[in-house]
Amino acid sequence: MPARPPAVLAVIPARGGSKGVPAKNLAEVGGVPLVARAVRACRAARLVTDVVVSTDDPAIAATARGAGAVVVHRPPAIAGDTATSEAAVLHALDAFEAMSGTPVGTVLLVQCTSPFLTGGDIDAVAAAVAEDGADSALTVAPFHGFVWRAGEPDGALPGESWRGGEPAAALPGARGREDAESLPLGRPAESGAAAPACAPRRAGDRAAVELPPPARVAEGWTGLREGGSVGAESLPSARPAEGRAPRGEFAPAEGEPSAARLAESGAAAPADAPRAGGRAAQGGGTAPAGAPRREAGRAAHQATAPPAGGHGVNHDRSHRPRRQDRPQDLLETGAAYAMRADGFRAARHRFFGRTELVRTDAARVLEIDDPHDLARARALAPLLDPAADPARPPGALPDRGAIDAVVMDFDGTQTDDRVLIDADGRELVAVHRGDGLGIAALRDAGLALLILSTETNPVVAARGRKLRVPVLHGVDQKDRALKQWCDENGIAPDRVLYVGNDVNDLSCFGLVGWPVAVATAHRAVRDAARAVTTAPGGSGALREIASWILGPTLAR
């Protein structure tokens, strides 16, 4: 048997110790726990082969398994308040490869605190690495706001622009979700090699950017700009603009000597000048020999300057261009990241090499960090969830316009889940003739049909031949088989109705637009279903579903 190709592994960190929203990862949005929503989105992605939830919480683990994920127990050392998402992904990556024996080619970090992330978003970020050759990728959304920060930039004179050169220590770094900070964006790999120089490019709707080393970042703002270079040539010059004082020297009023020159000449700084960094002149004395001119300049200015207000972060506050005249800024959504697995292991942070920016719908960007975010998500769910249809009230049933395919479990769905065994060990089951009539009507109406079963049983194959419906049986991972069948037949999973009865059907429920349970299904399956039949399994449930789609007379 040929070796399985490298996996595309989605890792969902979901620890149990959230502080801002207790038990956050189990909080429901649209009636579905956040961790289950993330698992379903990953399962709906075409390229994702495996989904792992990393958790230290038994309740989260149970919910994740019910949604179709593999659970990796996270040890306490990387489950605390200071734990990083990178640590969880590295641990889960190693654990998955040890458990499955399958190497991982591309690893994804998917956050369950982004409830409206779609399978399409995850597919796009995975494709950037797995298919398009990027080293790392992240989801971004268009952003048009002017960003301000209270106070003056660290190390800058009052009124000095961000673009004039804020020190690197004050620049924002990469964020870790889960109440902790991650490694700084742009940090070189642990090997000590410098990060590559910036080289943005366009790739469809994705802009690629390579991150500069921290020393270069200090030269100016590091916002991600679509279609424009953020290399050294685009960073602000260290030379002062015409008519401006050099950095480190405050421009005096006309006819007055600068405070820095006063310090150099030994003249006294103003008597009421406050101490600046412990070195500027104070109380009428002179600055110590060799004191930086910048300190003396700050001391002289602060004697008369008004209290600091705020400064522009991604703009020059003295210049207000129209929105259409400004470069397109892109905001990191915090929802999904993809990395080459080998590169991620070497760099130990999520941004390395060529980082590709994958645009997503700004209307769907929401990160849940506090109770107000959770309340907003719950209010938006009826509008943004893929299953939501304003024309279809809650409890409504599918019709022909919403369905392209019907996929059916066998035992417990087309049968009453009982098996009769004769003296020779042969199994016998009972089926419902009304179900056969309904399935024939669905086939004649042009819907794609499939019987999908974990059982390897001649009875299942015989029933498929009788109904003229293809059968996949003896399937261990039903969701993977279903995803492959949809891909091979060009069917969008959100236009599939899947009907099942037991917990091994839940992983398929997370893939499709219409998960349906029969009346006698396990309670967990009924709770996860979008619709539930009134007929029990093996007693006309499929005939009932056919009447939902085609009408009570099963008109073609």
Image (cartoon, grey):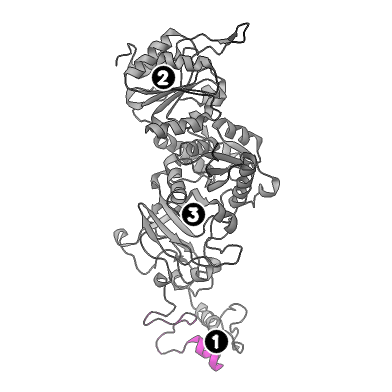
Q: Mark 3 packing: few (<14 Cα in 10 Å), some, or many (20+)? A: many
SS for dot 1: loop
SS for dot 3: strand
Label annotation for residue 469? 2
Tally the marks: 3
Q: CA distance from mark 1 to mark 3?
A: 53 Å
Q: Are marks 1 and 3 in contact (CB under 8 Å)?
A: no
Name the residue at the right extreme. 76
Q: Is residue 311 above or below residue 383?
A: below
Residues rendered magenta in the picture: 240-266
Q: Residue at x 40, y 62 (%)?
A: 200
- Which circle, 1 or 3, is nearer the viewer? 3
Q: Mark 2 packing: few (<14 Cα in 10 Å), some, or many (20+)? A: some
**Tag 1 residue:** 269
SS for dot 2: loop
Q: Residue at x 52, y 71 (%)?
A: 215
Q: Is residue 342 above or below residue 364?
A: below
Give, as a three-letter code, the residue at label 1. Answer: Ala
Label annotation for residue 136? 3
Give, as a three-letter code, the residue at label 2. Answer: Val
Relative depth, front residue between 62 and 291:
62
Task: Give how far across and how far down residue 377 sits, in percent.
Answer: 47, 39
Q: Is residue 18 among what the camera can see? A: no
Q: Residue at x 29, y 59 (%)?
A: 324
Q: CA distance from mark 3 to mark 2?
A: 43 Å
